[in-house]
Image: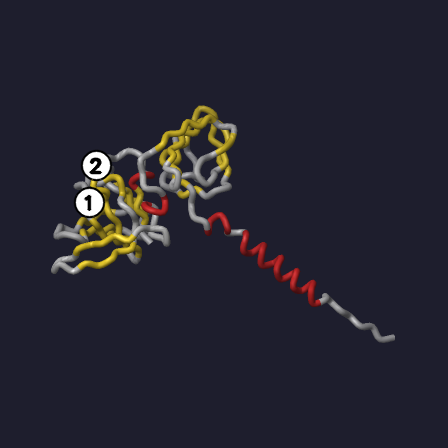
Amino acid sequence: MTRSFRLFAPELWVVAALTAFTLIASAPAARAAGPSAIVEEVSYETEDLLVFDYLFAGREIAVPAGQRLVIGYLSSCVREVVTGGTIRIGAKQSEGDAAITREAMACAGAAQVAGADASATALTAIFRGGDKEVVTGDRPVNSTLPVFLAPHNASTLSVSRLDADGPEIQLDVSGGVVDMAAAGAAPLQPGGVYFASAGAAFVEFAISATAKATGGPATPRLVRLR
């Protein structure tokens, strides 16, 4: 007796293919959307969280009793102090059973200071010789002492001014981070347009005309190199 086999009807192959694609595409969806927040401070020892680590929406974090975690949200510019309990990272703020104290910060938001993207505003820089060129990059940073996020393998960060003459600034990179305030560096100029590079990563950015030489929370001062 001859047996015939039919593994799947054509429509079932389509369903299977779509299901597989959905599973693959949805797995990194949270990361594809970019980070929601960064770690500003951790009062307890943990290998899972380090200062300036990115936090993505959906991540759950348990903060031990009597300890605190400080995070800054990139799009909402909300700074949260979390003590004792579990939180779930959201898009603009955390939720959970922990005690959460929130503070609104004056910052430009993730699209402006955490890295150039399609929503970033173009800056017009006046180069030596009088020529103007559109620089695509971040909107003004609200401090003349930014925090730069660079590749972890970079050793030196260079910052030079684009819209006027000025000395090139060279700073050591430690763990992919350069905090100009902590490094004791001379502040950048309010209203200035700058180019920063470290290894193969770079970014163009501007300093707000009303920016002050302030340290403090990193979130309002972030500039990410790509």
Task: Tell which circle, 1 or 2, labels the residue nearer the N-terminal end.
Answer: 1
Q: Residue 32 at x, y = what percent?
A: 46, 51
Tell which of 193 and 30 is nearer to you: 193
Give the labeled residue for mark 2. Answer: 212
In the image, is 187 to the left or to the right of 79? Answer: left
Neighbours of disc 2 within 10 Å: few (<14), some (14-19), many (20+):
some
Amino acid tagged 2: Lys
- Residue at 26%, 45% (x, y): give it: 140
Number of dots carrying numbers: 2
Amino acid tagged 1: Gly
Q: Say which mark, if any, is on residue 35.
A: none
For residue 92, say whether it is visible.
yes
Figure coloring:
secondary structure
In the image, is 35 to the left or to the right of 226? Answer: right
Q: Nearer the viewer, mark 1 or mark 2?
A: 1
Q: Residue 105 at x, y = what percent?
A: 33, 34
The residue at the far right in this view is 1
Q: Please, what secondary structure does the residue beneath circle 2 have?
A: strand
- Residue at 44%, 24% (x, y): give it: 66
**Residue 142: which quarter of the image?**
top left
For residue 152, say whether it is visible.
no
Q: Does residue 145 sit above or below 31 in this rendering?
A: above
Q: Residue 196 at x, y = what percent?
A: 25, 52
In the image, is 97 to the left or to the right of 5? Answer: left
The residue at the far bottom in this view is 2
Give the labeled residue for mark 1. Answer: 191
Tell which of 59 and 134 is nearer to you: 134
Q: Which image quarter holds the N terminus?
A: bottom right
